[in-house]
Image (cartoon, grey):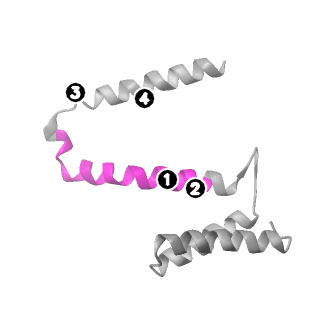
């Protein structure tokens, strides 16, 4: 059953990719479409981050991961370099797990 889902998903992705070649160029050059296409990666990454951070099988998990993402978000807000953001998030998770909160 899983292989059917993989094959169907692959076919849908290929069809969407092929569809991109038949869309008229004038449609793609519209400012509204260009702005919308620019937002897709951000929305997909945010959704992935939410699922990975809060998901635990079929339930929600409020553990060290949530605090780590929040701490990394604060570091990003303060415009810290990427390596510092990663270290802040990892350090927060490690500290909370070390004291038994995650």
Q: Residue at x 20, y 42 (%)?
A: 28
Residue 100 horizontal side relative to residue 80, left or right: right
Report the residue marked by disc 2: 49
**C-beta proximity under 8 Å, tags 3 and 4:** no
Residue 92 horizontal side relative to residue 77, left or right: right
Report the residue marked by disc 1: 45
Q: What's the distance in space between the residues labelled 1 and 3, CA to CA? A: 27 Å
Secondary element under disc 4, as helix, strand or loop, is: helix
Q: Position of residue 16 (x, y in %)?
A: 36, 29
Q: What's the distance in space between the residues labelled 1 and 4, CA to CA? A: 18 Å
**C-beta proximity under 8 Å, tags 1 and 4:** no
Q: What's the distance in space between the residues labelled 3 and 2, CA to CA? A: 32 Å
Q: Residue at x 34, y 30 (%)?
A: 17
Residue farthest to the left, as pictured = 26
Q: Is residue 15 depicted above or below 94 in this figure?
A: above
Report the residue marked by disc 3: 22
Majority SS type along the magenta span: helix
Mark nearer the N terminus (1 vs 4): 4
């Amino acid at each position: 059953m899983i292989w059917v889902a993989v094959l169907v998903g692959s076919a849908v992705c290929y069809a969407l990719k092929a569809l991109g070649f038949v869309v008229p160029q004038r449609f793609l050059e519209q400012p509204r479409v260009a702005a919308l296409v620019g937002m897709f990666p951000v929305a997909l990454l945010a959704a992935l981050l939410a699922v990975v951070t809060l998901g635990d099988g079929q339930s929600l998990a409020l553990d060290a991961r949530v605090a780590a993402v929040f701490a990394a978000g604060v570091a990003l807000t303060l415009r810290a370099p990427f390596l510092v953001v990663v270290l802040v998030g990892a350090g927060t998770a490690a500290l909370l797990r070390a004291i038994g909160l995650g």
